[in-house]
């Protein structure tokens, strides 16, 4: 249901749409939907994380490094490192923290 909500909200959204899928004492799983060209602005995470693309293609940026991720590819996100994500295509990603 949550993924359908994200896709519905994306129809009129101007920014990525993120929702918590699952949460425990030491972890959180987020789903993030993007329309082509949307940018998740620079930010940090207080926990180790893994970004996985389930649909589409995104660019993960960390400092001077850029990594293009396609469907089913993932990349680790270090603690307290400034990073951003930009959608090359309409995309659906999961971020696992903790």
Image: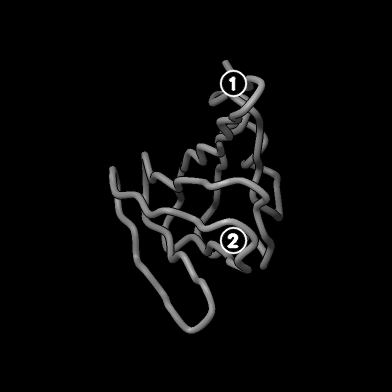
72 displayed left or right of 96: left
Q: How many marks?
A: 2
Tag shown at residue 22: 1
12 displayed left or right of 21: right
Q: Give the mark nearer the N terminus: 2 vs 1.
A: 1
**Which residue appears at 61% of the width and 46% of the height?**
47
Task: Pick the residue in front: 83 or 18.
Answer: 83
Tag shown at residue 13: none
**Residue at the extreme bottom:** 64
Q: Residue 61 placed where, x, y %?
A: 49, 71
Q: CA distance from mark 2 to mark 1?
A: 24 Å
**In which quadrant will I find the C terminus?**
top right
Tag shown at residue 38: 2
**In which quadrant will I find the N terminus?**
top right
Which structural element holds mark 2?
loop
Which structural element holds mark 1?
strand
């Amino acid at each position: 249901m949550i993924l359908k909500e994200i896709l519905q909200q994306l129809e009129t959204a101007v920014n990525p749409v993120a929702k918590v899928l699952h949460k425990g004492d030491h972890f959180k799983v987020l789903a993030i939907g993007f329309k082509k060209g949307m940018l998740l602005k620079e930010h940090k995470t207080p926990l180790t994380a893994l970004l996985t693309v389930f649909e589409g293609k995104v660019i993960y940026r960390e400092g001077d490094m850029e990594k293009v991720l396609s469907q089913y590819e993932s990349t680790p996100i270090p603690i307290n490192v400034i990073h951003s994500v930009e959608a090359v295509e309409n995309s659906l990603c999961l971020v696992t923290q903790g």
